Image (cartoon, helix red, strand yellow):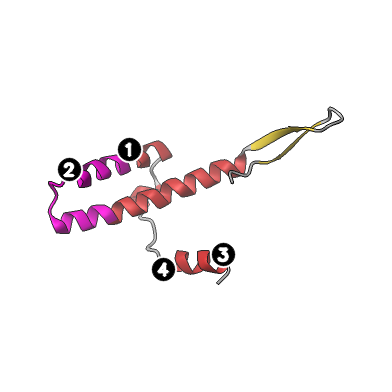
């Protein structure tokens, strides 16, 4: 399966990100995700709550990744050619 086809299939199998998470800034979502990780790592959360927290954490992670991709698309890098001319190119994080 191609990378693009795999990404489409994965996106189709994932639940929609709830409105309360979509409304969060990157920083707020990252903080909420960090709090979930801390709670899960503490080992003091019952199984059912752990499952719910894990699911919400996965949605927060996807939201953060979406925000980062959107930011990367807006960034351009400055390129200086051998002849000294300057131009910009889209940023590629890979």
Name the chief secondary structure element in magenta.
helix
Residue 56 on the magenta span:
no
Numbered badge on residue 52 = none
Residue at the disc numbered 2 = 42
The reply to whether dot 2 and dot 3 touch (C-beta < 8 Å) is no
Count of labels in the image: 4
Residue at the disc numbered 4 = 13
Residue 82 at what x, y percent from top left? 84, 31
Span colored in magenta: 32-54
**Quadrant assignment, res 16:** bottom left
Residue at the disc numbered 1 = 31
The reply to whether dot 1 and dot 2 touch (C-beta < 8 Å) is no
Residue 58 at what x, y percent from top left? 34, 54
Outermost right residue = 83
The reply to whether dot 2 and dot 4 touch (C-beta < 8 Å) is no
| Residue 39 left/right relative to 77 | left
Q: Tell which tag, 3 or 1, sits nearer the viewer.
A: 3
Q: CA distance from mark 3 to mark 1?
A: 31 Å
For the residue labelled by badge 4, is the local secondary structure a helix, a strand or a loop?
Answer: helix
Q: Earlier in the sequence, mark 4 or mark 1?
A: 4
Front in this rendered view, residue 1 or 18: 1
Q: Is residue 11 above or below residue 25?
A: below
Q: CA distance from mark 4 to mark 1?
A: 26 Å
Q: Earlier in the sequence, mark 2 or mark 3?
A: 3
């Amino acid at each position: 399966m191609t990378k693009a086809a795999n990404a489409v299939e994965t996106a189709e199998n994932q639940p929609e990100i709830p409105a309360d998470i979509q409304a969060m800034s990157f920083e707020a979502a990252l903080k909420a995700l960090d709090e979930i990780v801390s709670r899960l790592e503490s080992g003091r959360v019952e199984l059912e709550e752990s499952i719910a927290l894990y699911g919400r954490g996965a949605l927060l992670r996807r939201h953060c990744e979406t925000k980062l991709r959107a930011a990367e698309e807006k960034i351009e890098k400055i390129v200086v050619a051998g002849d000294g001319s300057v131009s910009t190119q889209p940023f590629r994080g890979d």
